[in-house]
Image (spheres, coloured by chain):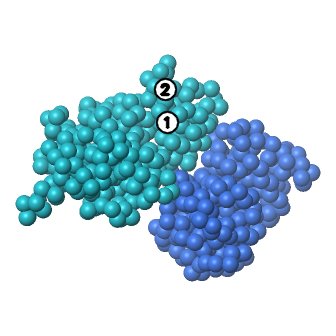
Chain colours: A blue, B cyan
Amino acid sequence: NWFVGIDIGSTAIKAALVDGDGQLVGVHVTDSGSLFHKNAKAALQALLDGHGLQREQVSYLIATGYGRKLFKEADDSISEITANAIGAHEAGKAHGGVRTIINIGGQDSKAIQIDDQGTVVNFAMNDKCAAGTGRFLDVAAANLDIDLEQLGDYHFNGKGAPLTINSTCTVFAESEIIGLLANGHGKEEIVAGIHYSIAKRTLRLAKRVGIEDRVYFDGGPALNRGLVAALQDELQRELVVPEHPQTTTAFGAAILARAEWLAERRGV
Amino acid sequence: NWFVGIDIGSTAIKAALVDGDGQLVGVHVTDSGSLFHKNAKAALQALLDGHGLQREQVSYLIATGYGRKLFKEADDSISEITANAIGAHEAGKAHGGVRTIINIGGQDSKAIQIDDQGTVVNFAMNDKCAAGTGRFLDVAAANLDIDLEQLGDYHFNGKGAPLTINSTCTVFAESEIIGLLANGHGKEEIVAGIHYSIAKRTLRLAKRVGIEDRVYFDGGPALNRGLVAALQDELQRELVVPEHPQTTTAFGAAILARAEWLAERRGV
Ligand code: SF4
């Protein structure tokens, strides 16, 4: 049996495939674009094609994320907070269990506290302000004329200390970055400063829910090693960062798809 | 005798000239640029040249605004809150007196409550978030490919109702504006929506200090008739908008320059 979770976010669509034993078999990530529904179907197809599967072989599919209501093909849907908690709890088992989840998405950021069963105890979310989200990284990378994927390398290649970005507002930070460049500062030190700025804001968000070990960090920006380092520094502890940080929430939805299907079969 | 107030803001430098009777004689407005001090000196010179005056003929000069500390030529300096209060109180006399001041600047916004002597009773300020400041107008005008000065006309030329801009964040509003354009919405209805978005945010700021009649509206964005209309709508009252809304704070500094000079002469 096969189970799929699909996380239709504002920036990217993530799909995860889980087998009958609840093991992660594969993931697929694609841009959301403006045609959410069409792109979500294409992402599902690509995931299945990659493993030589037909849609009929998927026993249960759960959608999550911002665009989940538009995806009628799903058997069920679930909030991204719950899906993220289930995914991180499951993935965290190999690391001795996690109790705090920090998720930085393309347009939001969240801190979730879970108990040792993976149940959400408390959470805090910012989806109103671009600062502290992946959007700030996009904007900063564009200002610096750097590819998003390069930010991590720049972080570690500076000769000097990270610069302080005084503006928390992304819009005002843009002007500040341009000013720092004009004053001859290195992109490396600016990039590190940006990572610390996001890390500080994330720390404040995480403190609202309470930080308990171990802390799991996921979402696309967790691919950025520089941001991971800055966040570890601010939180003063090691983070559990999964290999595919973008797909934890989709994985959680797939895990739940399997559980719901098993429950239905048992006639619960 | 002549008195000058110079308001060195992050976006523009405003200078006001007052005569021995405390009457406003002239104003000069120029961009701040990156060389605040040099540009402030040039603005002062331009103001004086325009009235055939030499620096020595100015009895007292007070600087205010963000860059006031850098302007060593001033006889004194004062916070922009106090200068704005003095200027609005003085200018408001012709309108029966004002008790609430709303100032939207290039990178901040303020609400100030004054008593009937022009003394500051209470104030609230936002200088951390670009939303609700002139910066949002700059960004939106750029997204719409409209000159800042045209926004007022667009506001009144829509065939349909103002569109709702759901994102308060300037960064997210940018994407929303681009999406509305892509969906074929008119620039006029989008512009009106932007003005209402700023007006709603300004209303919240003003409520923090309490709104008492009459309400004076100044700062560069008060030149935008569409924004004035939206703000009047949200506040549900007429606003007192001066002819030169950018220079109220500089005028207040000049009024104070005269008062300080008179007090010194009297040996107070
Ligand atoms: S602080 Fe800046 S990034 Fe945050 S909501 Fe305001 S405009 Fe947006």
Figure label count: 2
Q: Is residue B266 above or below residue B47?
A: below
Instruction: Name the spot of residue B35 as percent of width and height, x first.
Output: 49, 58
Residue B174, quarter of picture: top right
> As drawn, which residue projects farthest toward the top?
B159
On-image quarter of the C terminus of chain B: bottom left
Q: Chain of mark 2?
A: B
Q: Amino acid at mark 1?
A: Leu
Which of the pair B3/A59 is nearer the observer? B3
Is label 1 on the same chain as label 2? yes
Q: Amino acid at mark 2?
A: Tyr
Name the residue rendered at 23%, 41% in the picture: B24
- Disc 1/disc 2 C-alpha distance (Å): 10 Å
- Residue A77 lies left or right of residue B37; in this view the side is right
Which disc, if any, is residue B154? 2
The answer to whether mark 2 is within 8 Å of ligand 1 is no
Between circles 1 and 2, the one closer to the viewer is 1
Name the residue rendered at 75%, 62% in the picture: A149
Name the residue rendered at 30%, 41% in the picture: B51
